Image (spheres, rainbow, N blue to C red):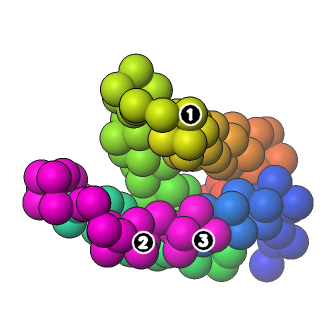
Amino acid sequence: MYSRPQPVSAGAILLALFSLVSHPLALLPGTKEVPAVIVYGGFVLSIGGLLASAGLWMLKRVWGFWLTLVVCVLNLLSAAPGLVLALGPVSKAITMVGVVVPGLIIVLVVLPDSRRALRAP
């Protein structure tokens, strides 16, 4: 059994917190103008993020790593248009967090120590 490196622990915790915070955003007032595909897609991404963080935490070498990368890339791509299209400074700040946090998680997961711990035995 490998010990969990700090970048993997930090990535798993960040991903779980990000998924938990973004999960209820689909239920906020004002989402009636947003297409249902976007709202339900965000819901699915938050559930996938929770599963991916569990996979990272348990050092699941195949599905934990790849699900984390897929969820973070999709989160990053879904938040990126808001950098240009957000109307107010609060919306831009929330969008910036939605871009920076998944990018940070990707960096933490692909660091050499993380890759070594997630490498198949």
Query: Is residue 18 highlighted in magenta?
Result: yes
User: Residue drawn at (16%, 52%), measured in percent from left and top?
Assistant: 33
User: Residue drawn at (16%, 61%), measured in percent from left and top?
Assistant: 32
Q: Quadrant of residue 25?
A: bottom left
Of badges 2 and 1, the one in the foreground is 1
Give the residue at mark 3. 16
Distance Cα–Cα, label 2 vs label 1: 22 Å
Residue 70 numbered mark, or none: none
Can residue 46 be spotted in the picture?
A: no
Mark 1: secondary structure: helix
Q: Which of the two discs, 3 and 2, labels the residue nearer the N terminus?
A: 3
Residue 23 numbered mark, or none: 2
Q: Give, as a three-letter code, the residue at label 2.
A: His
Q: Does 17 sit above or below residue 86? A: below
Q: Give, as a three-letter code, the residue at label 1.
A: Pro
Distance Cα–Cα, label 1 vs label 3: 26 Å
Residue segment shown in magenta: 17-38
Q: Is residue 10 left or right of residue 110?
A: right
Residue 89 numbered mark, or none: 1
